[in-house]
Image: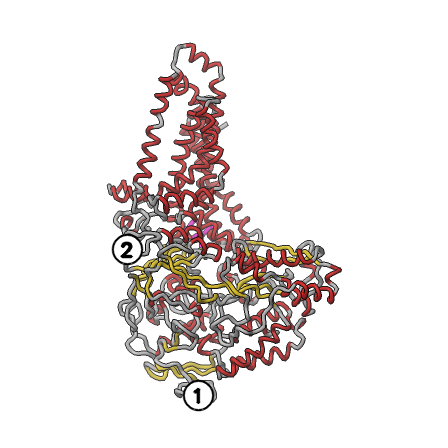
Amino acid sequence: MARFRSERSRRWVPALVLTIGFLATACPGASTPEGEGGGAETGAGDTGAEVANPGVLIHALGGEPEGLDPARLDEGGRGSRAIIQSYEFLVDIPPEGAALVPGLATEVPSQENGLVSEDGLTYTFPIREGVVFHDGTELTADDVLFSWDRAMTMDLPESQAFKLSETIADMRVVDDFTFEVTLIEPAALFLGTVVYSTPAAIVSQDAVESNGGVVAGEPNEFMDTNMVGTGPYQLVEWERGVRLEFEAFEDYWNGAPPLDATWEVVRDNSVGVLGMQVGDYDIIEPAPQFVEQLQGDDGVCFDESGYLLEPLHLAFNLDIPVDELPDGDTVPNDFFWDKRVRQAFNYAFDYEGYINGVLAGFGAIPTYLAPPVLGYDPDAPKYAQDLAEAERLFRETGWWDRGFTASVLAEQNNDTMIGVGLVLKDSLESLNENFRINVVVVPEARYDEEHGTVPFQYPMWVKNAEPFSDPDQVMQFYYHPDGEWGEVLGFRNGYEDPDEIAARIDEAGQSTDPAEREAMYQEILPLLHEDPMWLWAADEQNVQIFQCWVQDFIYNPLWVMPRWQFYSKG
Amino acid sequence: MQVRDYVVRRLLRLPLVLFAVTVLVFGLSRVGGSPIAIYLEHDFTQEQVEALEERYGVDDPLPVQYVAWLGGVLRGDLGWSGVSVAPVSEVLPARFVATMELALYGMLFAVLFGVSLGTFAGARRNRFADHATRVLTVSGASLPLFWFALLMLILFYVVVPIAPVGRFDEDVYSQIVHFTGFYSLDAVLNLNGAALVDSWRHLALPALVLAFEGMAVIARMMRSSLVEELGEDYVDSARAKGLSERQVIRRHARRNALVPTVTVIGLSLGVLLQGSVVVEIVFRWPGLGQWATDAVLRGDRATVMAFVLVTSIVFLLVNLVVDVVYAYLDRRVVLGT
């Protein structure tokens, strides 16, 4: 038997040799990023470590763009994150502050510099000379006209082209380097939200016309998968599901950026954190729960100065289709019509618990307009948990004794959103045993479909807000009784004076004086607080984590993502 | 029936089965939710939704849509992948090959270790080696793959940094001609040692992690089959003839114990493909699993249909191979009955 064992042992040898050989090939040093070749040695936790992958900035992101054509993309998606690296607008947002600066136009039009007519309808843009596209052609006013006209002609449902078409009455090329736009009506937000918006990015006319041209209602496959702008980065390769490689554009009008850049697709937060620890990635943006895993690591720096312009919120449905509600829900159609019920929900929610628990401390209770959006007021009224007040309001409305069951729709794989629902459930159910909140978690595709169903078939949903940079967008979208959500969710059923809210929002949106607008919004905020249409759970801090060898790191939340052109390594 | 005749007959029957698969795949893709869910936003008007339905050809009657889709499939046009922003037919081959390469290495490890461990344990029933093997295999079958994969990544990517994530090092990968898309095979065909090493470096950890569960199942099956076979009369006869225990196992018991194990091996391909979803995400492996998961979650029907179609074909072929191997191992099996 001893002989048998010895022979049997030898039969393990091939398997062991194969395995050891296999693993041995994974020699030390293999932890340099795949795709970047060797690279310098890195030392996690070693502030004096040699810079890994000099010459290229490696940014790990949780997914890849949903397309690359400015005329097809939604704002706030990953596609628009790529857009700001390779395309440009006539005006730009600087690294700090919200005041616009010249982009492909040499001046930001205003009445002071004479580039906006006295009636506020005509804007003249002097176009920068000597700018070339990635395909080598020179930028002229014709390209600007073509780009905007293209987006409006294509008019794709998934695009934001309506921003242009609903604002612009006429456009014309005055000369090779002068472009003029006439608006349908004066619009204070024209520069900030139309000129600086994804569909207004300037594309190469030659590139489009040589690759499918412009067809109304049809996407352009070439532009969906390629980028031909004037921006600091040229897209070199898009390896689906893995990475997008960008090269610093040598002929960039404002000087080529110091680094090439790679957008690494890293879907799992844990993997992003590990990659940061071994020095494979230069910048990551993990979910808040993962941030603490890197806190205290030498060589890893943090930027926590900004907030995502996407407050996490819970919607109240003021037009509940009782017959369509999930099984078990007992709330009537007019459940949220009484503002005291909405206030009670706002008072019951455990904000601190949500922020410290789900967001790991990286958040703040929202004040309706996030910094640095115009009108942001840190002293604006905001809700804090007050269970006694919540109980008082529920008793006043009779729901304290009657009790209710209501569902909240949330999206799968999104812990921050599901967390809002769960904290609400915990807050209300511990307040009164007759209250029951069911958090219905569904996959992304189903969530999108149900979220878009009119009438909306749940009493509440949880989401993060659209990343708006101008208060009028926020107000029209979220508060106006006849706005995007106002109509769907039936805000006119709930506002005590919907016409006054509507008039105030419209008036502030039409003013062209920023100071006046700011004052107007600050007057509106208390009204929205008193008559809440949403439960704003938190402003999520935008935590950028980067290797300390990344120099000159600066980030403006209005950009949506870090702009690589400003960074260097050393 | 001769094996050759059987294989030919099965292959001739394949188009019919595939046709049924296409009907099933298409039918299921139209159950529940909009077929263009990935492109829909909450604020679309009815006109906008209809425009999109027309663009993607989902406003026609279902039979017309099916014929159009099947015609596309036969022409190699599988539609547009919303999650990849590219034609499915452009993305699919690279994804398929990446997953198959990972799955084949995973299968190789699973079979190699599973059969060896099972034999090792079965021959030492109720001894320490058997118990130790049981601990290992039960762990393999019960540890959550996601957790195990992350644990391995922490160990071999961070603590002892010997295993990179991803599929290849671009500098090495770009030096060879990609005849088949299977990186390690192409490295051999190019006679490029550096590329072969690079491919193994990247494959080793994900393939071993992927193999762990399959290995456990195969080992358990092999052990119990072997234990059963070792109690059979013919084994006693072999021993009575004076054969050593090793010869008894190698020449007689193991071959018979392999018969049920082969069935499990065939089925374990399903386990491997299922596991590849997790492994591909954790190890950033650009394969079918990761792609299909994205597509399912985001409602990208063209991608999902292509994925299901391709995996169905793979399973049909694997089943054919399993049946043939089964017959080879057990002469009592009559093919074609």
Give SS at disc 2.
Answer: loop
* Cα–Cα gap, marks 2 and 1: 56 Å
Q: Which mark is residue A37?
A: none
Is residue A54 found left or right of B15 in the rendered image?
left
Quick one: SS at disc 1?
loop
Q: Residue at x 33, y 83 (%)?
A: A175
Please give the range of residues in magenta: B70-79
- Residue B152 coordinates in the image, percent (x, y): 41, 42
Q: Judge from the rendering whether residue B310 lies leftward or rightward of residue A257; answer left or right.
A: right
Regarding residue A496, the answer to whether it shows in the image is yes
Q: Which mark is residue A50?
A: 2
Amino acid type for the residue under numbered disc 2: Glu
Residue holding disc 1: A117
Dot 2, how many residues are within 10 Å of its Cα: few (below 14), some (14-19), or many (20+)? some
**Point 32% across, 41% down: residue:** B200
Residue A450 placement (x, y as % from top left): 59, 59
